[in-house]
Amino acid sequence: MTDSLLPAGDWPEMLPGWVWLVGAGPGDPGLLTLHALNALRQAEVIVHDALVAPAILDWANPAATLIDMGKRGGTASPKQRDISLELVDLARAGKRVLRLKGGDPFVFGRGGEEGQTLVQHGVPIRLVPGISAGIGGLAYAGIPVTHRDVNASLTFVTGHDPSGHAPQLDWSAIARGSAVIVIYMGMRNLDDIAARLMAAGRAGDEPVAIVQSATTPDQRVLETRLDACAAEAEAAGIGAPAIVCVGRAALLRQALDWQAMVEGATPRNPDPLGLGPAEGA
């Protein structure tokens, strides 16, 4: 395709009757992939989540129909079955359909469910990964999810099951086996999850960082500890959408808060892990 927003190249064509499942990234429009932008410029119908930034939708084909199918906690939201079948109906009507999902479609995004439904109904699909909030959102807050002096393992968990309660996971195995734990959609059950992790042996003073509205102008970050994270988040008014990082990786924000540097601040602590001079320093 030819588009002033895209560099020259051979870009995939979105054909009638196809559905592209595309990740929009964690929020900042600059984190959108070029394949996602290509999809936006071609789609005739865009079925998008609530967390997709309006600035991203501004890049859509001006003739496209926009359908908000966002799920919002605590309010009436479209049922997943209805969303999936709407995609099937649009494809069968011969439309070029973009299903635009926040983050990555396959990371707690139900993209697998939607893709499976489409395939079972004979609808061809294309998949375009996106930057997940559990990686990109934390990076924006200056928190690397891996660091060789902190962790050789990383676990992503969802903060709620289909009923809204904390998921029935082997919390003891997670607590023992993963130095860094990243929790999606966990604010409602944060107190319960923290209690389960501490009961499984994690220290109450373990560092925790909570990033609300990651990568957006509304981003807020709370640096706290495991035994106080739920209470301090409530007191500070930190809520969904948020990503929670449990582990010593959260300390690295003291050195790597690049957004503060942009505003002229100096790092609070260049050596938050207490390891001495970095390699090559």
Image: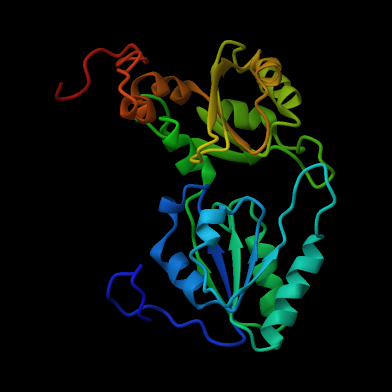
Measuring from the top left, give residue 185's x and y in whole percent. 67, 39
Is any part of residue 178 visible from this angle? Answer: no
Q: How many marks are shown on the rendered structure? A: 0
141 to 226, vertically: above or below: below
Q: Quadrant of residue 182?
A: top right
Can you give x and y, in whole percent of width and height, for residue 49 in the image? Answer: 65, 57
Estimate the x, y position of residue 167 in percent, counting from the top left: 75, 38
Which quarter of the figure is the N terminus placed in?
bottom left
Up the image or down, 16 lies above or below 258; here it is below
Is residue 254 shown to the viewer in this render? yes
Query: Residue placed at 57% from the left, 10% from the top?
Result: 205
Q: Residue 114 lies in what quarter of the image?
A: bottom right
Residue in front for this viewpoint, 193 or 93: 93
Q: Is residue 1 above or below residue 57?
A: below
Question: Viewed as shown, does residue 175 lie left or right of 14?
Answer: right
In the displayed structure, does residue 43 sit left or right of residue 194? left
Q: Nearer the viewer, residue 261 or 58?
A: 58
Compare residues 240 and 264 and report the one nearer the observer. Answer: 264
Q: How is the image coloured?
A: rainbow
Identify which residue is drawn at 44% across, 66% down. Answer: 37
